[in-house]
C-alpha cells in the first residue's frame, strides 16, 4: 500500500444505499431493529484500545508474530488502497453457493474490507470480503466471460440489463480499476479444463477425499464440484492447492476415496469405469504441483476475522496446525470459541494488517479494562462488547444473550439464516435453469437409492432433514462444520441422480 491510511475509520452509512436500490424489504427491515439497536458504547475500552500495541503485547506475552512470508498475497498487506464506496455495484460469488455469480452492492467499507449486499435480498445475507478478493468482478464481467449472472430478486432474467438497472435506480458501478488484477499469478495451465475429473478434499470435512469435477475456471483458480452433491460444497482454489489431487491419488496413498453420492457400488469405485460411463477425462497427473506446507506453527500470533461476527478482526494465536489448516484462538477469550481455518483463508492476516489498512483491531479481552456505567444494558458474555448480532448485519448490536453471537445458546447455531437461494429456488424454478435442473434431477432420484447411500458414514442427510422444520430451520451445515462432525448432505431434494450429467 503506497500511502498507508493509518486513520481508523468505520463507515456505518449503510442505510443510504438500501433506500436507493428500491428494495422495500430492506428499507423497512432497517427501520425496526428489535434487539439492541445501538451497540454497547465502545467508550469503556477506547483508552485500552488506544494504548495497546502489538510490539508491547508480544514482549509482555513473550510471544512471536507469524512471519509475513507465511501469508499469501490475498492475506498479506495490500498493494493498493480500498477504493470502493458504499452503493457501488459489482458482480461476485455468493460465498454459500460458490458457483453462483450475483449482482452485489457495497453496503459498508471498513479499511481494506467490504460488506457486500445481494441486491434484492435482505441484509441478513450480507457478507464481508477483502477489497482485493478474486471473488469480485466489475459490472459486465459475467457477460464477457459467459457466466450466468444471478440477477436481483424481482427482476426477470430475460429483461435484466445492467446499464438500464444502474440508470433506472441512479446507481454507480464500481470502476474496473478498483478490482485487483490477478494476471501476475500466471494463467491456468491449459491441461486443466472444465469438466475434467480429479480427487479433492471436502473442505467442510477435510478428512474426506472425494470424486470431483472442475466445474469452472476463472483466471488462476478452478471451481471444485463434488460429483452428485449440491453446489454448497463447491469451492474455488488454485491449481497448487493441497486440496486437489490427480485421479488415483487415494489409491497410491492408501486413502479411501469417497465415490459420488448414489454410486451403485461405492466400496468398489473404479475410475476407469466411471470416466467411461460419464465420458469424461481425468486431469493429467503430471500437471499437479503441490505448494510447500503452510509453515504456521502453534503459538504464533496473527490477526483473524472472527467468523461469528465477521465485521471484527481480533488478535489471535495459532494453537494447533495440520497439513492444510490452523486452529485459531482469540486472545483473552475462552477456548470454546477456538476453531479451525484453512491456512489459505483470506481472513487471516499478519500483525499490523488492521493498522496499515485502517481497520479496527479487537484487542485481547481483559476483564479489568471494561468499566460498565450504571444503568447501561450490557451483553452478559465475557469479552463481548455488544457489537454484531447472531442474525447478521441486520442489527448492528445486541445487549442480551439472545442476540449475542457468543452466548452459549447461540454458539451451536452460528448461522440461523435460511438459505438465500433455497426459498427462491422454490419460487423461481421456472425462470432459473440451473436450479430447475437440480429439481428435475431430484425428482428422478427418489427411487429408494438413497437408502443405500445412507449406509456411508458421511451421509447423514436424513438426520438433517428430520431436523429441518419450520422455525427450527437452522443451518446445519455450519453447525456440523463447527462441531467437526461428518458432513450432512443437503436435503435429499437437492441430491442429484445417478448417473450424473457430465459437467
Ligand atoms: Zn454479546
Image: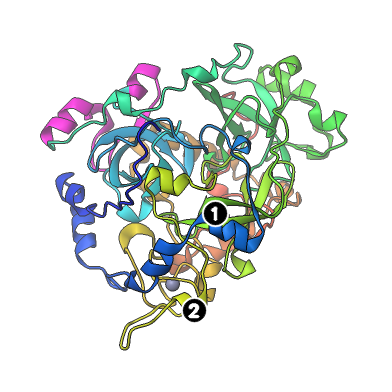
Q: Is residue 395 visible?
A: yes
Q: Position of residue 281 (x, y in %)?
A: 68, 16
| Cα–Cα span, label 2 and label 1 | 21 Å
Number of numbered discs visible in the structure rendering: 2
Q: Residues within 10 Å of mark 1 (few under 14, many from 20)?
A: few
272 left or right of 183? Answer: right
Q: Position of residue 277 (x, y in %)?
A: 70, 21
- Residue drawn 64% across and 12% down? 191
Residue range in magenta is 141-168
Q: Quadrant of residue 101?
A: top left
Q: Position of residue 340 (x, y in %)?
A: 64, 53
Q: Quadrant of residue 215?
A: top right
Q: Position of residue 356 (x, y in %)?
A: 42, 43
| Viewer-nearest residue: 20 or 343 | 343
Q: Which residue is mark 2?
A: 368
- Residue drawn 39% across and 62% down? 50
> Please, what secondary structure does the residue beneath circle 2 have?
helix
Q: Residues within 10 Å of mark 2 (few under 14, many from 20)?
A: few
Q: Is residue 390 visible?
A: no
- Residue drawn 19% across and 64% down? 31
Q: Which residue is mark 1?
A: 55
156 left or right of 235? Answer: left
| Viewer-nearest residue: 82 or 39 | 82
Q: Quadrant of residue 466?
A: bottom right
Amino acid at each position: 500500500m503506497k500511502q498507508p491510511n493509518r486513520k481508523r475509520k468505520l463507515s456505518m452509512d449503510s442505510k443510504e444505499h438500501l433506500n436507493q436500490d428500491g428494495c422495500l424489504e430492506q428499507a423497512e427491515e432497517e427501520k425496526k431493529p428489535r434487539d439492541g439497536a445501538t451497540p454497547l458504547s465502545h467508550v469503556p475500552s477506547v483508552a485500552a484500545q488506544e494504548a495497546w500495541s502489538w510490539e508491547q503485547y508480544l514482549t509482555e506475552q513473550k510471544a512471536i508474530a507469524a512471519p509475513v512470508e507465511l501469508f499469501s498475497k490475498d492475506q498479506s498487506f495490500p498493494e493498493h488502497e480500498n477504493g470502493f464506496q458504499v452503493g457501488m455495484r459489482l458482480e461476485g460469488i455468493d460465498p454459500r453457493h460458490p458457483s453462483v455469480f450475483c449482482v452485489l452492492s457495497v453496503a459498508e467499507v471498513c479499511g481494506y474490507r467490504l460488506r457486500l449486499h445481494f441486491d434484492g435480498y435482505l441484509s441478513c445475507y450480507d457478507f464481508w470480503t477483502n477489497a482485493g478478493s478474486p471473488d469480485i468482478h466489475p459490472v459486465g464481467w459475467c457477460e464477457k466471460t459467459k457466466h450466468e449472472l444471478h440477477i436481483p430478486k424481482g427482476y426477470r432474467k430475460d429483461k435484466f440489463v445492467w446499464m438500464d438497472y444502474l440508470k433506472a435506480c441512479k446507481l454507480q458501478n464500481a470502476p474496473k480499476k478498483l478490482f485487483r488484477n490477478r494476471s501476475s499469478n500466471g494463467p491456468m495451465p491449459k491441461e486443466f479444463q472444465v469438466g475434467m475429473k480429479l480427487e479433492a478434499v471436502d473442505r467442510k470435512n477435510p478428512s474426506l477425499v472425494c470424486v470431483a469435477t472442475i466445474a469452472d475456471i476463472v483466471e488462476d483458480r478452478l471451481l471444485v464440484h463434488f460429483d452428485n452433491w449440491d453446489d454448497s460444497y463447491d469451492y474455488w482454489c488454485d491449481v497448487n492447492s493441497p486440496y486437489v489431487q490427480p485421479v488415483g491419488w487415494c489409491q497410491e496413498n492408501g486413502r479411501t476415496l469417497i465415490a459420488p453420492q448414489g454410486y451403485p457400488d461405492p466400496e468398489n469405485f473404479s475410475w476407469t469405469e466411471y470416466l467411461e460411463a460419464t465420458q469424461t477425462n481425468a486431469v493429467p497427473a503430471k500437471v499437479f504441483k503441490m505448494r510447500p506446507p503452510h509453515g504456521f506453527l502453534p503459538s504464533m500470533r496473527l490477526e483473524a476475522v472472527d467468523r461469528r461476527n465477521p465485521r471484527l478482526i481480533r488478535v489471535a494465536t495459532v494453537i494447533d496446525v495440520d497439513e492444510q489448516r490452523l486452529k485459531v484462538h482469540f486472545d483473552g477469550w475462552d477456548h470454546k470459541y477456538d476453531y479451525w481455518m484453512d491456512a489459505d483463508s483470506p481472513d487471516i492476516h499478519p500483525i499490523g494488517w488492521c493498522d496499515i489498512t485502517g481497520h479496527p483491531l479487537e484487542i485481547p479481552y481483559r476483564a479489568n479494562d471494561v468499566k460498565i456505567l450504571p444503568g447501561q444494558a450490557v451483553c452478559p458474555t465475557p469479552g463481548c462488547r455488544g457489537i454484531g448480532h447472531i442474525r447478521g448485519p441486520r442489527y448492528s448490536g445486541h445487549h442480551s444473550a439472545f442476540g449475542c453471537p457468543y452466548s452459549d445458546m447461540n454458539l451451536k447455531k452460528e448461522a440461523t439464516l435460511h438459505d438465500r437461494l433455497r426459498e427462491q429456488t422454490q419460487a423461481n424454478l421456472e425462470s432459473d435453469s440451473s436450479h430447475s435442473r437440480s429439481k428435475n434431477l431430484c425428482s428422478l432420484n427418489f427411487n429408494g437409492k438413497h437408502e443405500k447411500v445412507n449406509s456411508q458414514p458421511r451421509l447423514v442427510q436424513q438426520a438433517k432433514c428430520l431436523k429441518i422444520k419450520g422455525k427450527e430451520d437452522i443451518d446445519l451445515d455450519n453447525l456440523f462444520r463447527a462441531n467437526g462432525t461428518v458432513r450432512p448432505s443437503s436435503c435429499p431434494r437437492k441430491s442429484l441422480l445417478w448417473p450424473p450429467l457430465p459437467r
